[in-house]
Amino acid sequence: MIHLAGPYVLAALLIGLGLAGLLLRRNAVLLLIGVELALAGALVLMVTAGARGEVDHEAGSVLPLFVMTIAAAEVVVALAIILTAYRHRARIDLDEPNEPRS
Amino acid sequence: MTALDLAFLAASVIAVAGGVLAITTRQVVHAALWLVVSLLGVAGAVLILGAELVALVLLLVYVGAVVVLVLFALMLTRAPIGPDTAHAPGLPRALAAGAVGAAVVTMLLSVLIPLAGGWGATVDRQSADSPRVAREIFTTWVWPFELLSLLLLAALIAALAVSRIQRDAP
């Protein structure tokens, strides 16, 4: 037996932390850490729905696997874009004005 | 308070503490390593909720692949060793980010706790049946599953194409 409030509180905290991290970071690579935390919160929510036995077709286990795959694809493309931008601008500060390297 | 509740609480504390440190530490490499700690906590929580397969894949994909990728990116962008003072967010921004985070947590709790059936609602833990999960993936979810393999291929090619862009290309 397990109390249901725990997983929901954990999910809410992780999503809040992820959003705060997104707003806090100026380093473009570390921005992704906030995204990952928010996705982990969503994942906990899905697993909780599965643990309650309210979903059919084992969606509580299958959908988190799909979310993780999509998150991995997202990170690969995002890091490729960030690294290309870094090569062009030699900066990864998101607050810098958008001008090419002199 | 059952033993499972205590175990879940411990995993949650690890996850949240790791998350807080991951988004606040000034050492950029440590941020990625604290993300590992946080995700280990999440994997523990998921394991306690009964989804063993999800917990294991979380460890493999996130800790094994995503964090390593982030660490590589940090090194390729010449992350400083030691505190990163050049990218400090400043106090107003930190306060705003904290306020937005707290507001989102409050909003989600006000929605999710009634959804859980109040603070006292409980559910019996039952392990997800891995053979059944596998059967469902390859019957009910087979088209989304195949689509995901296409998505991964597209991401692979896109990452290659983006990283080959030349600086002086027209």
Image (cartoon, helix red, strand yellow):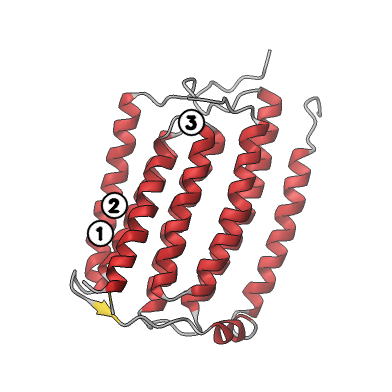
Find the distance from the CA under tag 3 to the CA under tag 2. Answer: 26 Å
Quadrant where the C terminus of chain B is found in the figure: top right
Are marks 3 and 1 in one subunit? Answer: yes
Depth check: give the residue in front, A72 or B59: B59
Question: Within the image, what quadrant is residue A2 found in?
Answer: bottom left
In the image: residue A70, left or right of residue A33: right
What's under tag 1, amino acid-wise? Leu
Depth check: give the residue in front, B31 or B166: B31
Depth check: give the residue in front, B80 or B136: B80
Residue that mark 3 sits on: B27
Residue that mark 2 sits on: B105
Q: Are marks 3 and 1 in contact (CB under 8 Å)?
A: no
Residue B109, which numbered label? Answer: 1
What's under tag 2, amino acid-wise? Val
- Classify mark 3: residues with Cα within 10 Å, few (<14), some (14-19) or many (20+): some
Q: Are marks 1 and 2 in contact (CB under 8 Å)?
A: yes
In the image: residue A38, left or right of residue B77: left
Q: Position of residue A51 (x, y in %)?
A: 39, 78
Q: Position of residue A99 (x, y in %)?
A: 61, 19
Q: Is residue A3 visible?
A: no
**Which callout, 3 or 2, points at the residue further toward the start of the chain?**
3
Are marks 3 and 2 in one subunit? Answer: yes
Residue A12 vertical placement versus B29 (above, below): below
Q: Is residue B97 visible?
A: yes
Chain ID for label 2? B
Q: Residue at x 37, y 41 (%)?
A: A20
